[in-house]
C-alpha cells in the first residue's frame, strides 16, 4: 500500500524511483545483473528460513513490474515493495 502525505512527492508510472523489495527465500547476490542491478542481501529469520532484500533504482514502474515478474518466476513470494526515494 502506498500512502501519500502532503510532504511527499507523488510517484508517477514513468518516473524513476529507488525501491526496497523483500521476498521470502534465499537469492544469491550473483542474480543482481539479471534483476536490474539491484543490491541483494539475505538474512536468516528466527525460524531458520531466509528473507532476501533487493534495493535499487529503477527507471519506471514498467521496469518494477518486470522485476516483480522475474521474482515470481523464481518462485520467491513477495513480502513487501516499498518506495525508498521517488523523483
Image (cartoon, rainbow, N blue to C red):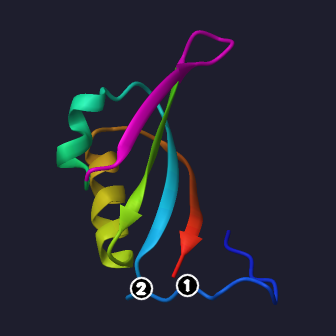
Where is residue 46? Give x, y as percent: 69, 13
- Tell me the tag on residue 62: none
Q: Is residue 38 left or right of residue 17?
A: left
Relative depth, front residue between 28 and 48: 28
Label 2: few (<14), some (14–19) or many (≥20) C-alpha neighbours in 10 Å = some
Relative depth, front residue between 2 and 83: 83
Picture mark count: 2
Where is residue 76? Give x, y as percent: 39, 38
Where is residue 40? Give x, y as percent: 39, 37
Label 1: few (<14), some (14–19) or many (≥20) C-alpha neighbours in 10 Å = some
- Tell me the tag on residue 11: 1
Q: What residue is drawn where x is 27% and y is 39%? A: 74
Q: Separation of disc 2 and disc 1 at Cα?
A: 7 Å
Residue holding disc 2:
15
Q: Kindly indicate the quadrant of the structure image that contains residue 75.
A: top left
The answer to whether residue 81 is above or below residue 27 is below
Q: Which residues are magenta?
A: 37-49
The answer to whether residue 87 is above or below residue 1 is below
Q: Is residue 37 left or right of residue 34?
A: right
Q: Is residue 84 left or right of residue 24?
A: right
Where is residue 24? Give x, y as percent: 50, 33
Q: What residue is drawn where x is 65% and y is 87%? A: 9
Outermost residue toward the right?
Answer: 6
Q: What residue is drawn where x is 18% and y is 47%? A: 34
Asked whether the beta carbons under mark 2 and mark 1 sit within 8 Å of each other, the answer is yes
Is disc 2 placed on a helix, strand or loop? Answer: loop
Is disc 1 placed on a helix, strand or loop? Answer: loop
Q: What residue is drawn where x is 41% and y is 85%? A: 15
Q: Is residue 43 magenta?
A: yes
Q: Is residue 2 magenta?
A: no
Relative depth, front residue between 75 and 60: 60
Amino acid at each position: 500500500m502506498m500512502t501519500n502525505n502532503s510532504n511527499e512527492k507523488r510517484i508517477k508510472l514513468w518516473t524513476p524511483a529507488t525501491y526496497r523489495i523483500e521476498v521470502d527465500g534465499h537469492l544469491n547476490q550473483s542474480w543482481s545483473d539479471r534483476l536490474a542491478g539491484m543490491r541483494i542481501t539475505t538474512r536468516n529469520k528466527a525460524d531458520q528460513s531466509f528473507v532476501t532484500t533487493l534495493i535499487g533504482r529503477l527507471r519506471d514502474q514498467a521496469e518494477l513490474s518486470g522485476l516483480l515478474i522475474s521474482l515470481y518466476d523464481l518462485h520467491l513470494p513477495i513480502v513487501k515493495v516499498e518506495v525508498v526515494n521517488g523523483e
